[in-house]
Image (cartoon, rainbow, N blue to C red):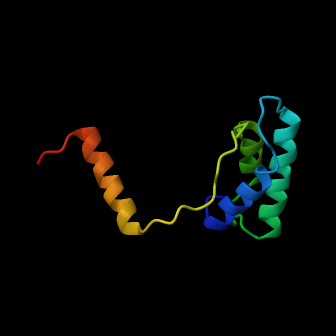
Amino acid sequence: MFTVEGLRATSEVWEQLECREKETLQDAERLTEQLLDRLISESLPDESVTQDHVNVLYRHWPLPMYNLDLHPIPVSLEELKAEQERLLWAEVGDPR
């Protein structure tokens, strides 16, 4: 689920629901089932995935997802590392 392909599938399945504070548990179960079916049909789950993982997903999936945009943001690895470094020093204090 946390690969580019998995996030793409998640985005495309969950963008079907326009969150307006009237979502139900049945909405979450329906979309979670659609997502799992898609992940399996695209052979995305790792061989180590068990039924326990699926059960956790059903019990703890956040609903609503508040119309999250899960499309990729183009950014280089260097930019990500620089931002990570900046955030680290902002949190612990820059010794320079």
| Residue at position x 74%, y 47% in the image | 52
Mark count: 0
Residue farthest along the left direction in this orientation: 96
Horizontal and vertical percent position of residue 64: 73, 36
Left or right of 75? Residue 15 is right
Q: Is residue 36 in view?
A: yes
Residue 55, by quadrant, is top right
Left or right of 44? Residue 41 is right
| Residue at position x 18%, y 44% in the image | 94
Horizontal and vertical percent position of residue 51: 78, 51
**Which image quarter holds the N terminus?**
bottom right
Residue farthest along the top direction in this orientation: 21
| Residue at position x 29%, y 39% in the image | 91
| Residue at position x 69%, y 39% in the image | 66
Horizontal and vertical percent position of residue 38: 81, 62
- Judging depth in this view, the residue of 36 and 84 nearest the camera is 84
Horizontal and vertical percent position of residue 14: 77, 50
Q: Is residue 48 in view?
A: no
- Judging depth in this view, the residue of 40 and 63 nearest the camera is 63
Q: Is residue 78 above or below residue 50?
A: below
Q: Is residue 46 above or below residue 59?
A: below
